[in-house]
Structure formats: C-alpha cells, structure tokens
Amino acid sequence: MPHAPVIRAPEPREAEVLARLHVETWRETYAGQLPDEYFGERMLEHRRTMWTRLVADRRDDLRLAVAEADGCLVGFACSGRPQDPEHPPRLRQLYMVYVSRTHHGTGAGQALLDAVLGDEPAYLWVAKENPRAQAFYARNGFAFDGAEHPDERVESFIEARMVR
C-alpha cells in the first residue's frame, strides 16, 4: 500500500504536472462516460492554462492543496467562492478533489477535502454516475438537494449538486 501523502500548497512550477494529473485522474474516473477526446491534447492544454492561472492566483477566497507521495503529486483539491450565477446554496463551493487511483484508500482524498474546506458549509457538483465520489461526500456530510444539470460540452454527462 502506498504511503500516506503529504498535503501542501502547490507551487507555480507544478502547473504542468497538475495539468497532466488532472487529465489522468479524469480518464481514470470518467472513462466510458466522456468521449475519448475529452482526455486528449486539447483538454491537456486547457488544464495547463487553468493550473498556471490557479497556482499563480493569490485571491484570499481560493484554497488549493496538493497531495504528494514519494516525491510525486498524486492528488489535488480546490475550493472558492460560488461559481453558480444565481442563488448559490452556500458561500463556498468545492470545485474539485481528485486522487490518482493508485492512491485511493490512503486518506489522500479526505486530507485534501479537509485542507480546502474543513467542516465549513459548502456545496459541490458531482457526476451522477460516480458512486464512489458520492459516497465520499455523503460521509463528509453532503446530501443531494435535487439540483442537476448536464455538462455544457457533453449533455449526457449529468451532474448533481450536494450541499452541507
């Protein structure tokens, strides 16, 4: 079993590694739910741009954390102000928690969630076809509130909102 990872803030020089890890964890999580091109070069470039911006952003409301094990990044999490344009159910949104499959069960996901949310009230969007993530969030006090929407690029990919 892999060692428990160290949780820390990401460094700007890690944007490329985070972009690649992001695409890889999506492939592990959503293969069969999203088209193969979703995990290709175009998405990698989009994630490079996103992570370069995120690791350089010093907004007070943005919280980023990475999980590092044996000198390699194996997970990441991010939360911040609500992205929903109207009537967000909470003042903080969990944007993402992803951990490489090889580090599932090591406590990395829990440590990342704790680092970017603690026990604060928050909400998130989770894929309806992701029971592992749904169970994780439920263990952390989140419950579905009935709101759902399709992904803007893949309408068959439905996300449901969970709130605590």
Image: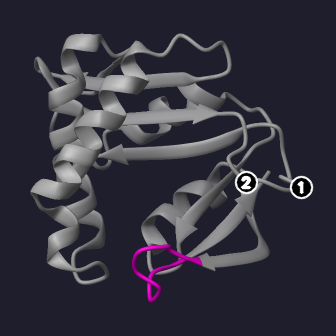
Asked whether disc 2 touches disc 1, contact meaning CB atoms under 8 Å apart, the reply is yes
Is any atom of residue 32 visible in this view? Answer: yes
In the rendered structure, which amino acid carries the disc numbered 1?
A: His
Answer whether residue 157 is magenta in the image. yes
Answer whether residue 108 is magenta in the image. no
Residue 47 is situated, as x and y percent measured from the top left of the image, at 28, 43
Residue 33 is situated, as x and y percent measured from the top left of the image, at 31, 82
Q: Quadrant of the N terminus?
A: top left
Residue 98 is situated, as x and y percent measured from the top left of the image, at 36, 47
Residue 75 is situated, as x and y percent measured from the top left of the image, at 30, 36
Q: Is residue 143 left or right of residue 106?
A: right
Is any atom of residue 101 visible in this view? Answer: no
Residue 6 bears which disc, if any?
Answer: none
Q: Secondary structure at mark 2?
A: loop
- Residue at x 75% of width, y 64% of height: 143
Which residue is tagged 1? Answer: 87
Q: Is residue 61 above or below residue 153?
A: above
In the rendered structure, which amino acid carries the disc numbered 2?
A: Asp
- Residue at x 29% of width, y 35% of height: 49
Quarter of the rendering containing residue 72: top left
In the image, the segment drawn in magenta is 150-158
Which residue is tagged 2? Answer: 84
Q: Is residue 151 above or below residue 21?
A: below
Quarter of the rendering containing residue 126: bottom right
